[in-house]
Each structure stands twice: as C-alpha cells, then as structure tokens.
Amino acid sequence: MTAVTRFAPSPTGFLHMGHAYSALFAKSAAKDGRFLVRIEDIDRGRCRPAFETAIFEDLAWLGLQWEAPVRRQSDHFAEYGEALDRLDKRGLLYPCFCTRADIQREVAEAASAPHLITHGPDGPIYPGTCRHLSKSEQHRRRDAGTPYALRLNMAEALAIAGPLTWCDETHGIVAATPEIFGDVVLARKDITASYHLACTWDDALQGVNLVTRGEDLLPATHIHRLLQALWDLPVPHYRHHALLTGPDGKKFSKRDQAPTLRALREAGKSAEDVLAEIKVRE
Ligand code: GLU
C-alpha cells in the first residue's frame, strides 16, 4: 500500500531542529508514497500568518517537497462543526460551563478521596460536574450567554465503541485506554474545535494511513482511536518517534529558545549542516 504521511505543525513560532527532525521523519516514512503538510492553526489567538509563511520557507530550505494543496485547519471550522454534530446527535457530548478555577477546586476536593484518579496525560481529569446538568439547566445557561466547551461523555463513548486497539510500528499492538483523559474537551470555549477533533478528522479525510509524530503525542492516540471508532473512520498505522535532544540533553520541543532553523540559517549554517546535525542527534 502506498504510504501517505503528513507533517502537521502549528504556526505559533518558527520551526526548530525538533520540527526539522519530525518533518524529515514523516517524509522518509512516506518512502515513494505521498507526503503532506497540514497547518494546524485552529488556535487563532496563538497562530500567526507570518509563522505559516516561515514554515513553508524553512521546509523548502531543508529540501523537502510536499503535495499541494496544503490543508489549513482554520478554513474548515464548518466541517469540524459537522463532525461534532454527529457525536451530539448520538448524545455523546455535553456542554461544560466550568471555569478553570471551578475545575481546580473540584479536583482538589476529589483528591481527598485517594481511590479516585484525578490526573491524566493532559492534567486534572474533569470531575464531571456539568455531565449531570439537566437539559433545562443547560438551555438556561446557554441562553444566558455563559461560555461553554463541549465534552465527550467518555463512559457512553466507551460503551458504544467497545475495546479498541491500534498498531504502533514502534510499540506494537496497543490497547486504547482513552478513559485516562476523562471527559475530554472536543470544542473549546473560545474555539469550536480541539486538536483531537481536527487532527483525527483531517488525517482520515486526507487519507493519511501512517501517522508519524513525536512520542509526546502518543497518549493523544488513545483519544484519536476512539474518535475514529465513533465516526467510523479508517484507522491509520502510527509511528511515534523519540524527541530530538540538544547538546544539553534537553528536548528541542520543550526548550525555551531552542535555536530556530531561521536563526541557524542566518548564522551561516546550510541545510546540509542541519541534516548532519540531526543524524548525529537521532
Ligand atoms: N500540531 C501538532 C504540533 O505541532 C502536531 C500534531 C500531530 O502531529 O498529530 O505539535
């Protein structure tokens, strides 16, 4: 089967060596198949057009070629809305009006009951407060203009989907445990989508059959696998790669002020220098 891979950066800053590694990893995993670039810019408050332009310049400088057209997620909010509707129609979503402070307070209270698991890969697990609101209370708050997120009712979703696995080319067959996230947010208060929603939807829509990305995103795959089951989407293979570390042993993606490809270029480095540096660090 022809491999279809993608590199899916968010234009929130300039690309650094960690991104270069990830992009090259995806390109090489495609072999003689198709390599796509997707701009994940649903968080418009943090994304900038100048960073998007810079992504294309930097990838071209590295010698990468990708297929046109590039999918830009901020052009597709209507589609993400339809994807949400599909889940809503099956009663799998509920509006959550809680503020961050509400959640922190509830989690702190729940933490005093030691048998409860209160933290997941993304931080505190939502204690489910708004899951119990009546329909009329939901309407009352919506009508009053109280901002809300949309959460997935995890227990219901799991009951429908049943046990799931995915094939990770690094880790083998992995049993999906999306419940470690609790009732995950699928549409944020300020953005009518979320990374999990848009990424899962787009990977299927674009025919990506091999998802490559850093292992920091491995836990996210548990949710993506569940969403694929709920939407009845094809299931790609996954290959999560270790994160590239700098000379100080710290991960590029986690470092503040990691040198950008742009800065390296301006300092006189060639693309070959960067590629050689990546080979050494791999
Ligand atoms: N947009 C994500 C990031 O920049 C990558 C998402 C993915 O590869 O699934 O970290």
Image (tube, grey):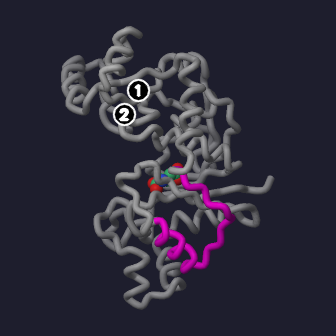
Residue at disc 1, CB closer than 8 Å to ligand 1? no
Dot placed on the residue nearer the N-terminal end, 1 or 2: 2
Q: Nearer the viewer, mark 1 or mark 2?
A: 1
Whether residue 219 is visible, yes or no, is: no
Q: Is residue 270 magenta?
A: no
When the figure is inspected, residue 176 is found, relative to residue 39, above or below; the finding is above
Which residue type does callout 2 highlight? Gly
Which dot marks residue 182?
1
How far apart, in angstroms, are the residues tagged by discs 1 and 2? 8 Å
Question: For mark 2, what is the residue?
Answer: 120
Q: How many marks?
A: 2
The structure residue drawn at horizontal position 58% and vertical position 35%, both measured from the top left corner, is 225
Q: Secondary structure at mark 2?
A: strand
- Say whether marks 1 and 2 touch (CB < 8 Å): yes
Whether residue 72 appears in this view of the structure is yes
Instruction: For mark 1, give the secondary structure.
Output: loop
Give the residues in magenta: 52-73
